[in-house]
Image (tube, rainbow, N blue to C red):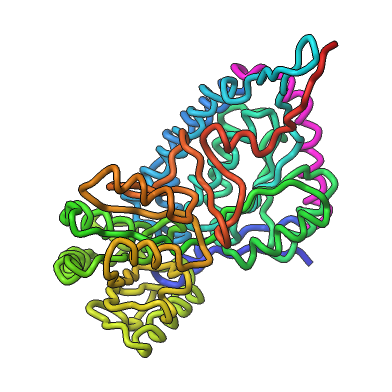
Amino acid sequence: MMTSLKTTNPFNNSTHATYEALDNAALSAAIASANDAQNSWRALSFTERGEYLKAVAIELRKRKADIAKIMAEEMGKPVKEGGPEVEKSAWCAEHYAEHAEAYLADQVLESDAQKSYVHHQPLGTILGILPWNAPLWIAFRFLAPALMAGNTCAMKHDPNVQGSAKAIADAFSAAGVPPGVMVNLPLANDHVESAIRHPGIAAVSFTGSSRTGALVASTAASEVKPHVLELGGSDPFIVLDDADLERAADVATLSRIINAGQSCIAAKRVIVVDDVYDQFLSMVETRLAKLKLGNPLLEDTDVGPIARDDLRTNLHRQVSESIEAGARCLLGGELPDGDGYFYPVTLLADVTPGMTCYREETFGPVMSVIRARDVDHAIELANDTDYGLGAGVWTGDSALGERLAKVINAGQVAVNGIVKTDPRLPSGGVGRSGYGRELGPHGIHEFVNAKQIWLG
């Protein structure tokens, strides 16, 4: 019997659309088409591949409003955030189109040879297993570098964002990218293992939870296939007493509630030194209280619904357990009635290390504020986590900020700025936040063979 994938609108709980899932035969055929396309794709010059990627960027921009609407209806992202996500994805395609050749230039190394160097070659067909929270952006940070390196790609998107996945595939087709270079795999989650183990898949890129990432990693490792994992985070946001508190409060608010707080690199644990704790707490409370929850299709909506009901239920568990353990709830914290998977913007004060919202990743519009005695205690708290994705430091002393950035256990640290991903800079984590890097020059090196060539 044919399996179907149903997408649900989190604003009103209605079925958005239904898509036919691939069976094992169709999966093998799709991967075979990517394998068949790989030799001719890798034979193209960087310039030729780049022209295709630039054409894809053009198509994305043409369809920006439609794609933003699809994301709003499938996973609740406000359209005022969806449009910029499409633009950023197009930028990613253009960035690698322009810089891939330089990133993968031969590296000459001295040895006993007349000439010795490292030459970078594609691995084959790369499987991308992608989450729902940034359907366009996370797809392109996988697709753009892998394709420009000469690989072909098989994209397995989350079941609940199949319309977004189809929109990506349609953009590639409209741009004239040869068939098989990027194939869309509408798969049920229980068929992902078959895709990873398929002999036509050379390597795997996964973005998602730490628990699922461990399963992906063990499966890929059992097949001796390279893989990159970008997993969860419990990102610290440190505010010192000499910081520009107005700017820090603005950025803490934005970082915590963008995409309804459903971002791996959002500020999760706001750690404020004692001298300015009460003042900063009041500042973020004022800002959070002004935010408008509502229909993600409306331009004045600040916070849309949580993507799925099970995610909302888990978020409320985390909040409830933290309140029971002694956190003060200054805003929100109650599960609303009515249609849609909404969760109120919530502010928890006096969160301590034993509490659930401190220990677990909170994927929703919940800000946890933690009091630190001083800068040393703030760093101790920041590093008191199994995760290590992003982190922020706010201080008027930029030299101190840089020193602290170097001792925080994270893949990226922003000093006096928002933690964000950028096609020009590597992104990734340590600990339970995963390994390997995406984006920048480092990201394109993950799925190539660094071949040593020795000439006597």
Percent of width and height locating residue 188: 69, 62
Taking the image as drawn, is residue 367 in sight? Answer: yes
Query: Which residue is drawn at the image coordinates 75% and 35% (left, top)?
Result: 123
The quadrant holding residue 276 is bottom left
- In magenta stretch: residue 32: yes
Percent of width and height locating residue 16: 50, 62
Task: Please give the count of numbered marks on the rendered protein.
Answer: 0
The quadrant holding residue 266 is bottom left
Quadrant location of the C terminus in the rendered image: top right
| Lateral position of residue 239 relative to residue 40, left or right | left
Query: Start and end of the magenta stretch?
Result: 23-48
Taking the image as drawn, is residue 290 in sight? Answer: no
Viewer-proximal residue among 358 and 132 = 358
Position of residue 110 relative to residue 314, above or below, is above
Percent of width and height locating residue 371: 28, 72
Percent of width and height locating residue 317: 44, 83
Query: Which residue is drawn at the image coordinates 62% and 68% (left, top)?
Result: 211
Quadrant location of the N terminus in the rendered image: bottom right
